[in-house]
Image (tube, coloured by chain):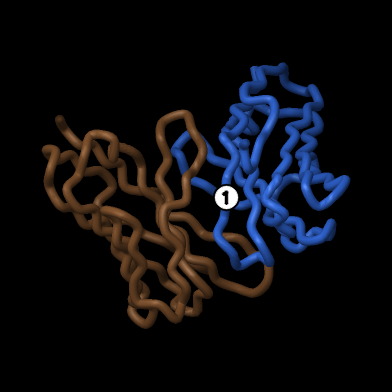
Chain colours: A brown, B blue
Amino acid sequence: KQEVTQIPAALSVPEGENLVLNCSFTDSAIYNLQWFRQDPGKGLTSLLLIQSSQREQTSGRLNASLDKSSGRSTLYIAASQPGDSATYLCAPHSGGGADGLTFGKGTHLIIQP
Amino acid sequence: DTAVSQTPKYLVTQMGNDKSIKCEQNLGHDTMYWYKQDSKKFLKIMFSYNNKELIINETVPNRFSPKSPDKAHLNLHINSLELGDSAVYFCASSQAGFGELFFGEGSRLTVL
């Protein structure tokens, strides 16, 4: 059974800093891994999807890397802004067909203005 | 134009009642899901539907039943509601089960 751990659980930093959020998973036999953000009282917004054959994926100030063999992914946020404040969730997709994703508990990020 | 929409957004009801949450996606995806987010914010999959066929069914009580009238809709019916059913329920969809997952805004269910 896939288990996902996200470190740190919470992070508060001043605006402008570069950040790294960590995700580890126990079953390395994944098809892809997706990073989401969740704002309070809202649904999940997809940030990046990395296929198992890829090492990294970039979107704007966000860069996600994947080391499948070691069961790790990182989300790098450059030049953080107060609007980046949210909970960030990592979800590897393992198993066949429509098994769905396994979510970590997330990193609660606060960017201080 | 909302990709995955759920209704209602808020639902407050008494124990023992039966309720439904509706979900629709306009992305043309062939797989839809229901997730439950508990008070500790932990997300767990409940069901997924692929081409109107139930693919997985996690260990949820049989009081919960997904119903899919067509590929674009996956509704969640809950019978005999219990206090422990209070949570936020999210609908999601993807293409072919491996594609990028898109979520609805969630439906907050409160059982009194």
In terms of image quadrants, where is residue A65?
Answer: bottom left
Dot 1: element: strand
Considering every residue shown, the one lying at the far right of the view is B69
Q: Which residue is mark 1?
A: B102
**Residue under the image location 35 percent in, 77 percent down:** A55
Work out which quarter of the rendered image holds the N terminus of chain B and state it: top right
Q: Position of residue B11 (x, y in %)?
A: 66, 21
- Residue A70 higher or lower than B46, as above or below: below
Front residue of this view, candidates A57 and A37: A57
Work out which quarter of the rendered image holds the C terminus of chain B and state it: top right
Residue type, mark 1 in image: Phe
In terms of image quadrants, where is residue B81?
Answer: top right
**Residue under the image location 66 percent in, 36 percent down:** B5
- Residue B90 higher or lower than A91, as above or below: above
Q: Is residue A10 left or right of residue B68?
A: left
Q: Position of residue A67 (x, y in %)?
A: 33, 77
Q: Is residue B55 left or right of residue B40?
A: right
**Residue under the image location 61 percent in, 46 percent down:** B35
Front residue of this view, candidates A16 and A92: A16
Q: Position of residue A54 (x, y in %)?
A: 40, 77
Front residue of this view, candidates B35 and B16: B35
